[in-house]
Image (cartoon, rainbow, N blue to C red):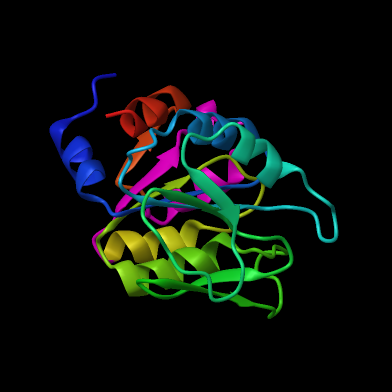
């Protein structure tokens, strides 16, 4: 599919890229991290569900394969452009203001910590319409409400086509509440990220 002028323009005008998913999204997130250009000129924030107290090599694997600076978020980290940040396990990641993250230890949302909804909702408050948010494969409804808030605040919102997703619950939940500007297959999402 040829991507239309609207989606390309809105993507190029975004200052922040939010990439999120759960079950079935790891390979897609890895592919995105590997192919994002060094001079993207955006802040990239990744929220992926992980098992509680499960040591993960995700950050190491992603960092070794990224052309951009990549790190796991710590409390009060400064938000820089041309950097990829990964939400840590066992915390909710919030955007405190345009230049700073904060971590929260409150209860899981949709049995998940980090919760995609928590990060998406705080990004909608702080960045308004300056985000592109992409919700990928997952086995629950986390992310749908946050994506809707981003869309209502003017951000570009994209959902992986459920027929293309390993787990369709998460993208389907977002589509059901009209949270997506666009529903794209993984190949089309990667095509957009390289525009």
Counting every numbered tag in the picture gives 0
- Residue visible at 35% across and 71% down? 98
Does 166 lie within the magenta span? yes
Above or below, 136 against 132 in this view is: above
Residue in the foreground of this view, choosing between 22 and 35:
35
Q: Is residue 116 left or right of residue 179?
A: right
Looking at the rendered image, the quarter that the C terminus falls into is top left
Range of residues picked out in magenta: 153-179
- Residue visible at 43% across and 22% down? 187
Does 109 lie within the magenta span? no
- Residue visible at 63% across and 34% down? 64
- Residue visible at 62% across and 30% down? 27
Give the image location of residue 35, x and y in percent.
46, 28
Give the image location of residue 96, x and y in percent.
45, 78
Looking at the rendered image, the quarter that the N terminus falls into is top left
The quarter of the displayed image where residue 95 is located: bottom left
Above or below, 58 against 108 in this view is: above
Q: Is residue 6 visible?
A: yes
Residue in the foreground of this view, choosing between 65 and 90:
65
Give the image location of residue 191, x and y in percent.
35, 25
Q: Is residue 24 visible?
A: no
The quarter of the displayed image where residue 185 is located: top left
Above or below, 151 against 135 in this view is: below
Q: Is residue 141 left or right of residue 35?
A: right
As drawn, the residue found furthest toward the top would be 1
Q: Is residue 77 left or right of residue 155?
A: right
Give the image location of residue 47, x and y in percent.
57, 54
Above or below, 79 against 5 in this view is: below
The quarter of the displayed image where residue 89 is located: bottom right
């Amino acid at each position: 599919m040829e991507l239309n002028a609207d989606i390309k323009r809105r993507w190029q005008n975004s200052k922040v890229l939010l990439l999120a998913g759960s079950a079935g999204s790891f390979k897609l997130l890895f592919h995105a991290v590997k192919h994002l250009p060094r001079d993207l000129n955006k802040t990239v924030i990744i929220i992926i569900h992980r098992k509680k107290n499960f040591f993960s090599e995700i950050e190491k694997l992603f960092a070794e394969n990224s052309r951009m600076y990549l790190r796991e978020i710590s409390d009060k980290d400064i938000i820089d452009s041309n950097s990829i940040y990964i939400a840590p396990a066992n915390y909710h990641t919030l955007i405190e203001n345009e230049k700073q993250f904060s971590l929260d230890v409150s209860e899981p949302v949709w049995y998940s910590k980090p919760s995609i909804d928590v990060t998406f909702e705080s990004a909608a408050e702080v960045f308004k319409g300056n985000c592109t948010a992409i919700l990928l494969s997952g086995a629950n409804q986390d992310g749908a409400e946050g994506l809707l808030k981003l869309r209502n605040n003017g951000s570009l919102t994209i959902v992986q086509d459920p027929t293309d997703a390993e787990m369709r619950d998460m993208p389907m939940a977002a589509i059901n509440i009209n949270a997506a500007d666009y529903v794209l297959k993984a190949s089309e999402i990667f095509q957009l990220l390289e525009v």
